[in-house]
Amino acid sequence: MSLLTGLKGHVFAPVDLLTSEGAKQDGATFLRSVRGKREFDIPILIEGRTSREFFARHDEWWRGVETDRPGHLGLFTRYNGWSFSQVQLDSAPEPLGNVDPAGDYCEAYLMGATAMDPAYRSFDEEVTWINNLGLNETTLRVRNAAGMKQWPRYTMNGPGRWWIEDPDAEGDSLRLVATPLLEAGETLRIDTGKRRPTARVYSAATGFNGRNVWAQLKGRRWLFPILPWQSKEIVVRVEGGNSASKFIATGTPRGARPY
């Protein structure tokens, strides 16, 4: 199976500008931009060396493309590496050939797919610090290697209480957000994203699902993301930790273009 030339909808994400207009102003006032779902037109060619191989590949391909559950469309460039989009089949594929595939061992289709999230994602980038010198403080440089804002995710172990800087892009003030106190053997995972802010503690006692401790932040949260194509130094401190205290900052590059 190989992709044909003619792929559409894969480069730029659809965008709309929200504006306000009034009788006492010329033109309009810009409010924000909104990206809608991304729709792809994907020409594909499924082929095999024998009739048996063709039908096996044909069945494999269409088993992997569903309407109710998203799969992954990956695009690779030497400049930007891999970019992935979660897509779902949005219409019945149209056969493009007029030859019996049982004899020609190939068939071309035009497949329509929709990505509910218009952004492409790349592989996670991690920065790790271990308090092996016992300094209890460090500065980590977290990078955003894509064109959309990035909300970092943090993973840290106990015992102790962690203090993590809010990456204020508008000034030089140092604002640290304190985590709940962790016991030895516990691991805290925090997602700072505005749409899915979470803080859960995992241990042998809590099992796979963990324990929700977001309320223990008492309204304190991270207000600023890492801006597109930039990096930010983040101050991290641990109080009551030890030489095995470990902190991981994880970012997922998200962009409107695959390259």
Image (spheres, rainbow, N blue to C red):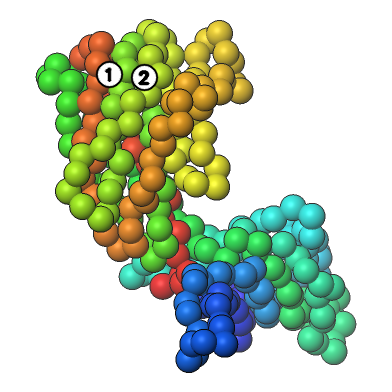
Image point 52% across, 25% down: which residue? 215
Q: Position of residue 252 (x, y in %)?
A: 43, 50
Image coordinates of residue 141 in percent, x first then y, are 22, 45
Mark with earlier residue (2, 1): 2
Measured along the vertical axis of the image, is residue 101 above or below residue 227? below
Is the C terminus in the top left, top right, bottom left or bottom right quadrant? bottom left
Residue 157 numbered mark, or none: 2
Q: Which residue is mark 1?
A: 245
Q: Nearer the viewer, residue 148 or 257?
A: 148
Q: What amino acid type should be assigned to the residue bearing mark 2?
A: Asn
For image coordinates 26% across by 37% down, the residue present is 175
Type of amino acid at the residue the image marks with label 1: Ser
Q: Position of residue 54 (x, y in %)?
A: 76, 68
Figure check: 157 above or below 223? above
Identify the image quadrant of residue 255. bottom left
**What is the quadrant of the N terminus in the image?**
bottom right
- Locate residue 243: give its quadrant: top left
Horizontal arrangement in the rendering, residue 139 relative to residue 17 (left or right): left
Which of 86/99 is in front?
86
Residue at image location 48% in from the left, 79% down from the top: 29
- What is the quadrant of residue 190 in the picture? top left
For the residues bearing labels 2 and 1, Cβ distance under 8 angstroms: yes
85 versus 110 height, above or below: above
